[in-house]
Image (spheres, rainbow, N blue to C red):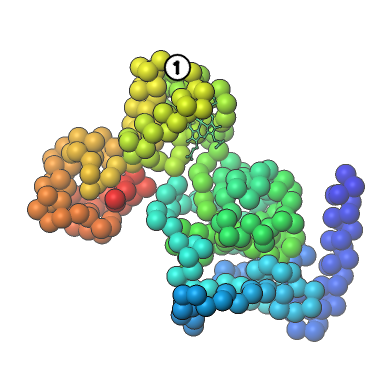
Amino acid sequence: MRKIICGLALFSIFSIGAFAQDKEGGRHVGGGRIPSLGPAPDKAHTPAQAPGAAEPAKSFADRPGHPEAPHVHSNDKWIGHDSGPNDPNYHLDQPWRNGHFTGGFGKGHLFPLDGGGPDRFWFNSFYFSVAPGDYGYCNDWFWNSDQIAIYEDPDHVGWYLAYNVRLGTYVHVMYQGLANAQLTLPEAPARKTFETVCGACHDLRTGPRRTKAAWVAVVDSMAGRGARATDQEFAAIAEYLTKYFGAVDVNQGAAKEIADVLEIPAQDADAIVRFRTDNGEFKDLDGLKKVPGVDANAIEERSTRIVFK
Ligand code: HEC
């Protein structure tokens, strides 16, 4: 309770300060302000440093009293979003592996945080995680009360920007999927086994989508951690997860697996395998969509079920 009162008191002091500062050029940070737009894409990208060169110490506190973290000025200028698209901190081998966030972006969509921490936080049943390199920029976030808004990151594929309305700071976040409250488990004989065996230690986890081999590996690793079931039950669980929450490697998977996971006709899956045998591995979704006879829309729609290894 004391924390809340303290927070409120601080909030009002900040707001008064904010009005005073606005007259001096609109450079106040946080205190309830919400940017109308996300950052512009980084055009003037500084090239990567020569190996061995010392990293310059990054400072974000561009003005007295501004936070030592990426933040947004009251004139909507995003400070600290200038490392460019090649920043290794935000490189992902599999961007959007949990799909895209669908809860709404920007100023018109404020979300009160509902719990968690940098490695996993949530609001309105949406789960997110902060980029590990950004953990240091959200030490002062209240994970169960702050309001945030989500913006698209124009530079880093697979990331969003979460803006903290109270503090005016932001971090890179990755969408982790929907919470269990909204998770509808398809009915199948193995569903009950999955719920009983896998719900014993933590919330039922069905994401991110994984290949059959990867689900089998998860189930094995859970057995190693103490999950209790017969071999048959473990196999049925892996099968269930692959069927409904599976992904397929279109460069390795057999035609049947491709057809099952992507829910496409067998002859389309055959065409994919034939094309791959004749022309070499697929590099990306566009390559896959070019396979003659394959429904490009169906491929696009199921892109989160496809991996390229
Ligand atoms: C004996 C306790 C226990 C049971 C039962 C259990 N798990 Fe886990 N699980 C853990 C622990 C511990 C972790 C690692 C810490 C964490 O992520 O919470 C974990 C992590 C996970 C992860 C994240 C791993 C990753 O690499 O991202 C998944 C997915 C998962 N479990 C799925 C399952 C499935 C599927 C089952 C049922 C076969 C299951 N768990 C049963 C204890 C258990």
* Whole-percent x, y for residue 186 in the image: 41, 27
Quadrant containing the N terminus in the rendered view: top right
Q: Quadrant of residue 150?
A: bottom right
Placement of 142 over or under 125, stated as above or below: below
227 horizontally vs 232: left or right: right
Q: Secondary structure at mark 1?
A: loop
**Is 66 on the left or on the right of 59, as rendered?**
right
Q: Residues within 10 Å of mark 1 (few under 14, many from 20)?
A: some
Residue 161: quarter of image: bottom right
Which residue sits at x=45%, y=17%? Answer: 229
Where in the figure is residue 190, as x and y percent of width and height? Answer: 39, 20
Return the x and y of residue 46 as percentages of the image width and height.
Answer: 49, 81
Residue for badge 1 = 229
Beta carbon of the mark 1 residue lies under 8 A of ligand 1: yes
Residue at x 87%, y 61% (from the top left corner): 10
Residue at figure coordinates x 74%, y 66% from the top left: 30
User: Quick check: 305 above or below 7?
Assistant: above
